[in-house]
Amino acid sequence: TLKPGGYANYLAKDDIFYTLERAKVKIVSHDKGNSVKSALIKVKRLLTDKVKSILPEPEASLLSGLIVSGKQALPKETLESFKDAGVVHMVVLSGYNITIIAEFLLIVFAFLGSRISGFIALGGVVLFTIMSGAPATVVRGAIMVSFLLLGRLMKRPGSPPRILLFTAVLMLLHNPKILLYDPSFQLSFLAVLGLIYGTPLVEKLFASHSHEGDSRQIAFRLRELVSTTLATQLFVLPLLLYSMGNFSLVFLFANILILPILPVVMLVGFVGTLLSFVLGVLAMPINFITHLLLAYILKVADLFGNLPFASLEIENFPLWGSLVMYGLIFIIVW
């Protein structure tokens, strides 16, 4: 867990102040919670159970993690490989997943008009946030995407820095403790700051004018991918070193090989899972493609995560070191 405060303060942010060892749990009642939340959790369980029935492990856990469950669905060994390869953020439900869901709904319901499809996408974002359990990364992404969707409906452009600041204020008003004791909140906002302010600077370093036609388009996409990956990692690096003491040295290569196909995996996997409920035979080719793509992601993560130089570990990295690094980042951006 992140310093300062350690595990006790990490739990305290969720109003957990005591822990019990070897506790016995007894269910005294059920079916008395929020009916909407209960229905969404049942849908989540149906999806994860269906995924496990159509795909082997660990592919099934990876797909469940990508679409509804997050990294908790992954086996420990697989999760460690993802961490060492620097791609664990892909299976942490976040604004990236929310954005893909919103764009998917906008495209599917585009025939109803931009206004209605926008409201459907907005409703889908809210429902997905509740179904996922509303972790900090999902809440942050949901608020930001919701404001962008509202801006589209009102035909007003959104300002990402202002939306990010307003999102942080809303979340801190609800629970001020997450500012110091929630690593998901801290890393999520730092990563988005990297996207907003760091990406344009990094892109300038990779500017190229020597390509034409398709090769130029490919070079642009590659430069964009490399720039966003480097920028986000740069902004979270000082906090990672101070709080966890490790950092992946192979993250760039692993991200380049995995990120481009991630939206495809999520879309194909979700469609295949839905079809499996009603048309199992027709879903088989889609599920086979999903299996191949998931196996590819797992292989890349395993290959890079198990390299002897995959990650750098520094014990007791000083707070002043992180502050100096953030000071330098601030000066460069300024």
Image: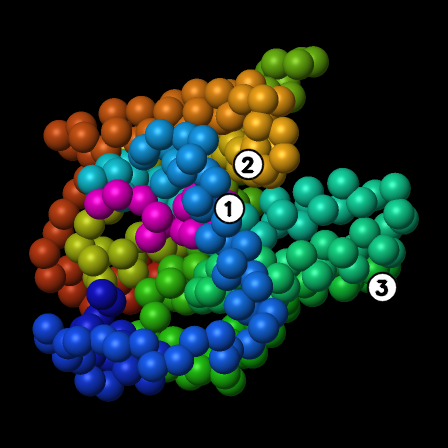
Q: Residue 28: x percent and y percent?
A: 34, 81
Say which residue label 3 marks: 154
Q: Disc 3, disc 2: CB below 8 Å?
A: no
Depth check: give the residue in front, 137 or 265: 265
Type of amino acid at the residue the image marks with label 3: Met
Residue 239 vertical position relative to residue 88 in the rendered view, above or below: below
Left or right of 267 on screen, residue 241: left
- The mark tally for this picture is 3
Can you tell which quarter of the image residue 214 is in? top right
Q: Residue 175: x percent and y percent?
A: 44, 82
Q: Residue at x 51, y 46 (%)?
A: 47
Depth check: give the residue in front, 196 or 21: 21
Type of amino acid at the residue the image marks with label 1: Leu
**Kind of element beneath mark 1:** helix
**Distance from label 3 to label 2 (Cα)?**
35 Å
Does residue 67 show up magenta in the picture? yes
Residue 187 vertical position relative to residue 304 in the rendered view, above or below: below
Depth check: give the residue in front, 192 or 11: 11
Say which residue label 2 marks: 273
Image quarter of the N terminus? bottom left
Q: Disc 3, disc 1: CB below 8 Å?
A: no
Instruction: Give the residues drawn in magenta, as a range.
Output: 63-76
